[in-house]
Image: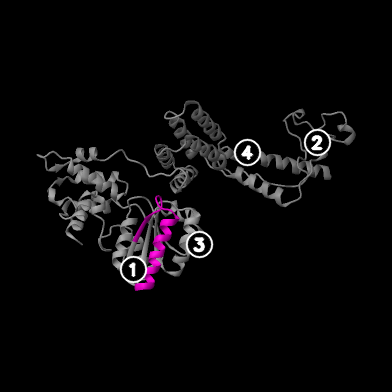
């Protein structure tokens, strides 16, 4: 490298944000993801054996996907080619693959092809990768924030090891912040700034496991200190980080996982968890109508007749959502979620629905019994429609022993919880009366 090239490289390095400058250089410097990179874990064993094939790194931003790809490239001494799927097309991809093939043929040198935001490649672009991935011309490292089982083509997934990155722990983020403060060459060590433990703990907490966000906030705090100040306290730290941007894709994993957590929290009778997941989704920009629909569904599916009022409250919250909109509609939505969560639970309604549906789809469709058929037109009596029907309200207690289906079926089986216990008692009484009437008829 010439003098001017070296100077340009140094200028570019100085312009990089702290998070980029502090990227780990070795596996031992890498922080977090010990569930697959710790001693004896799969990825570390693959690296130790130099058997890196194709892998997909999947997880939220700031958890080290790009950093680990660069560490792997250094560790394996392979050529490292990088592509951003959001800005590249098939032409650029083919060019890199051709160069990797030539490099392998001419010098026996293998290539790691790192593709950031791999989920942004369409099916055709992903298919272009397959032959060279399968033949070993390149070892693919794909980074994605989207679930690869939904966002990548099946052949590519089947040829790759999937490693799910988790948010860094607060302890991991604190370690990275303290390392950056003492590193003179790449970090902020030359500034000799004292940062209070309270300020560091705040940055580690509010960053939500995103190392990039925490490090860049620390750099802003240090670089914005007045010339006469050498201390960064909690107040400065709070001013150095933007309002928390919740990692949330309204059509991806975050959407489905948070919705699943909300539904299961209401079903599991945990109002605090239900409120948390509901508010988290609202804060992230989730459509209130979607949440209202989920609460209405839960009111029938998971509460049902154990507390019929749950559906009334849930539907009222849905109507209020349409009527008043955000942000006030948050209040009735939270109220309804709490009501559903704390109500007695029964899934007898959904079980009855499923049993009847299965019966209708699998068995012969039952004809409507003659005495139940419509008798409100002139020729009905000539067909025998409605003949023998008994009007329930003509009986003193509003019930008559009458066949309404034509065959013996039981779809609805109430539980002994909440109001459904009263329903169960009522149905048992009617069953007993039918049995008594049948015995009287036989005698």
Gap between marks 1 and 2 measured at Cα: 75 Å
Is the C-beta separation of discs 1 and 2 under 8 Å? no
**Residue annotated with mark 4:** 423
* Residue under the image location 45 percent in, 30 percent down: 329
Q: Magenta region, mostly helix, strand or loop?
A: helix
Highlighted magenta segment, given as a residue range: 81-107
How many marks on residues?
4
N-terminal of the pair, mark 4 or mark 2, is 2
**Relative height, residue 373 to residue 182 (above, below):** above
Instruction: Check disc 1 and report the residue beneath it.
Output: 47
Rate crowding at label 4 as few (under 14), some (14 to 19) or many (20 or more) other CA atoms within 10 Å. Answer: some
Q: Which numbered mark, 3 or 4, is in the foreground of this view?
A: 3
**Residue at disc 3, secondary structure:** helix
111 sits left or right of 403 in the view: left
Residue 386 in the image: x percent, y percent? 83, 34
Label 2 residue SS: loop
Residue occupying the far right of the picture: 382
Measuring from the top left, give residue 257's x and y in whole percent.
45, 47
Q: Residues within 10 Å of mark 2 (few under 14, many from 20)?
A: some
Q: Which residue is mark 3?
A: 155
Q: Which mark is residue 403?
A: none
Q: Height in image: 185 above or below 261?
A: below
- Binning the other alpha carbons within 10 Å of mark 3 as few (below 14), some (14 to 19) or many (20 upward) gives few
């Amino acid at each position: 490298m010439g003098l001017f090239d070296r100077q340009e490289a140094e200028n570019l390095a100085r312009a990089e944000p702290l998070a980029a400058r502090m990227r780990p250089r070795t596996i031992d410097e890498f922080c977090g993801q010990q569930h697959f990179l710790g001693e004896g874990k799969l990825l570390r064993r693959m690296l130790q054996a130099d058997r890196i094939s194709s892998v997909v790194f999947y997880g939220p931003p700031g958890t080290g996907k790009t950093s680990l790809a660069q560490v792997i490239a250094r560790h394996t001494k392979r050529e490292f080619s990088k592509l951003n799927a959001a800005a590249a097309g098939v032409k650029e991809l083919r060019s890199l693959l051709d160069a990797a093939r030539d490099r392998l043929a001419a010098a026996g040198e293998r290539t790691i092809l790192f593709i950031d935001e791999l989920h942004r490649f369409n099916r055709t672009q992903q298919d272009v990768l397959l032959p060279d991935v399968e033949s070993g011309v390149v070892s693919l490292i794909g980074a994605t924030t989207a679930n690869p089982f939904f966002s990548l083509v099946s052949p590519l997934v089947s040829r790759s090891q999937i490693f799910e990155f988790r948010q860094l722990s607060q302890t991991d983020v604190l370690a990275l912040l303290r390392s950056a403060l003492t590193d003179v060459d790449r970090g902020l060590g030359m500034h000799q700034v004292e940062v209070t433990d309270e300020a560091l703990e705040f940055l580690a907490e509010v960053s939500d496991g995103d190392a990039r966000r925490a490090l860049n906030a620390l750099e802003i705090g240090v670089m914005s200190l007045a010339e006469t100040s050498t201390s960064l306290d909690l107040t400065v730290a709070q001013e150095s980080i933007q309002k928390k941007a919740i990692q949330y894709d309204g059509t991806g994993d975050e959407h489905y996982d948070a919705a699943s957590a909300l539904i299961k929290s209401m079903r599991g009778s945990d109002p605090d968890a239900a409120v948390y997941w509901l508010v988290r989704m609202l804060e992230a920009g989730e459509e209130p109508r979607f949440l209202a629909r989920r609460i209405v569904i839960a009111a029938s599916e998971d509460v049902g007749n154990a507390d019929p009022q749950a559906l009334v409250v849930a539907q009222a919250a849905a109507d209020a959502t349409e009527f008043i909109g955000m942000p006030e509609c948050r209040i009735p939505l939270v109220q309804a979620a709490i009501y559903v969560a704390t109500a007695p639970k029964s899934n007898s309604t959904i079980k009855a629905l499923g049993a009847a549906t299965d019966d209708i789809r699998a068995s012969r469709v039952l004809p409507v019994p003659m005495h139940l058929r419509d008798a409100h037109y002139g020729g009905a009596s000539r067909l025998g429609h409605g003949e023998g029907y008994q009007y329930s309200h003509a009986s003193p207690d509003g019930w008559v022993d009458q066949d309404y289906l034509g065959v013996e079926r039981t779809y609805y089986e109430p539980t002994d919880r909440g109001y459904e216990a009263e329903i169960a008692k009522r149905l048992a009484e009617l069953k007993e009366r039918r049995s008594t009437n049948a015995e009287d008829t036989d005698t």
